[in-house]
Image (cartoon, coloured by chain):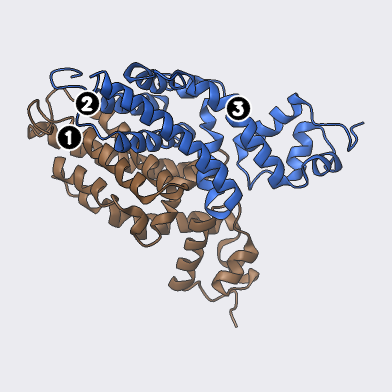
Chain colours: A blue, B brown
Amino acid sequence: MTTRSQPLSEDRLDKAMHLFWKKGYYDTSIEDLMARTGLHRAAIYGEFGSKKKLFEALLTRYRAKVTAGRLAPLKTREAAFAELKQFFHQFRDVQAMPAGRLGCLMCLTAAEVSPHDASIARIVSSYLGELRVLFRRASVNSRRRGEVRAGIEVDQVADYLTGAVLGLMALARAPAPRAAVIHYVDGVIGFLNGLQPKGEGR
Amino acid sequence: MTTRSQPLSEDRLDKAMHLFWKKGYYDTSIEDLMARTGLHRAAIYGEFGSKKKLFEALLTRYRAKVTAGRLAPLKTREAAFAELKQFFHQFRDVQAMPAGRLGCLMCLTAAEVSPHDASIARIVSSYLGELRVLFRRASVNSRRRGEVRAGIEVDQVADYLTGAVLGLMALARAPAPRAAVIHYVDGVIGFLNGLQPKGEGR
């Protein structure tokens, strides 16, 4: 029997996270969460106070447990052109990855919840900001090394690549064939190749 | 006093469509729809039978009233490279357009509802299919005219551009600055320019 004082186990938190990832915030009811985690309503409210507070905690968990691994290639200080390509290449067959058909909980939340809720918008904005910073640093490094043309605008590239992640994750979740996602990633890699000095990359 | 037999006026349908566009499907309650349209519950259920049937009708309305206009440049049989660029260019400052901060109802629904509902997935899939067909035709025309390289794979280009629309509309709705959307569109146009024969487009 679960009591108020027992903290949610890692396994139960993961189950709740996956439920939100699958169904989105609004369509996930407390009853759904109870059924999926085996917890009583009092245990969920006792620990988090509200569905929204639980969701916010799980967004942070998602960032630590899911996106951090995906971003790993870009997280070294010297990440440059090869790491930009590596980052996108890992999603080439995202729909074959575990939970790949679900896309990204953070990207879904950007569209579904962030326009209506300031504190959730801040969490999403912080994540998109991290993406942008990582893309920008890798672009600066690429330019310094001559892997892309000297005239490349790194802010433009960073914003484009951030939006490209949103597009990728939307397409993964949309009713679209796997081939479409593969073609999409090839398009983003084509964009990156197009930044190389003339005579390379085509 | 509204009665069951009175069909929903155009104005009321538009109000209901905008409410779903703003809030998404799951967070829009029948009470919200009643408050926004001034209709009684019986009038909504009497005409449509359910919230879902109303939503499906409004997705079709959205496609006729919103996306059809946006797709106009690509709808002529001879649409080619200039029309591809024109299509994306119109969204360069989408966040300054009326309702631009809301992105696209069809793209939101792709992520929010289509993974869970077969009949809504069919509506979204039909829309994404139309995008793909229009992008593919314009790519074929561009290749035939020599506006892009002869080796371009038109299926890859069409899938990439379809995902690029999802990315654009996600970014427009996300907590991101206007400049980011402008940079994103510039990136997609950069991708298109990169398809041109060598020596052009840079």
Whether the residues at callouts 1 and 3 have beta carbons within 8 Å, the answer is no
Residue annotated with mark 3? A64
| Residue closest to the eye, A170 or B5 | A170
Instruction: Tell which tag, 1 or 3, sits nearer the viewer.
Output: 3
Instruction: Tell which tag, 1 or 2, sits nearer the viewer.
Output: 2
Q: Chain of mark 3?
A: A
Residue A20 got which mark? Answer: none
The C terminus of chain A, quarter of image: top left
Q: Position of residue B201 (x, y in %)?
A: 12, 34
Q: Position of residue A147 (x, y in %)?
A: 25, 19
Q: Residues within 10 Å of mark 3 (few under 14, many from 20)?
A: few
Whether the residues at callouts 1 and 2 have beta carbons within 8 Å, the answer is yes
Query: How many numbered discs?
Result: 3
Label 1 to label 2, Cα distance in Å? Answer: 9 Å
Residue annotated with mark 1? B193
Horizontal side, residue A51 vs residue B151: left or right: right
* Residue B139 in view, yes or no: yes
Name the kind of residue labelled 2 in the image. Answer: Gly
Q: Secondary structure at mark 3?
A: helix
Q: Position of residue A43 (x, y in %)?
A: 84, 39
In percent of the image, x 27 and y 38: which residue is there? B188
Query: Which mark sits nearer the N-terminus, 2 or 3?
Result: 3
Name the kind of residue labelled 1 in the image. Answer: Asn
Q: Chain of mark 1?
A: B
Q: Chain of mark 2?
A: A
Label 1 to label 3, Cα distance in Å? Answer: 38 Å
Q: Secondary structure at mark 1?
A: helix
In percent of the image, x 10 and y 34: which residue is there? B147
Residue annotated with mark 2? A194
Residue A2 lies in what quarter of the image? Answer: top right
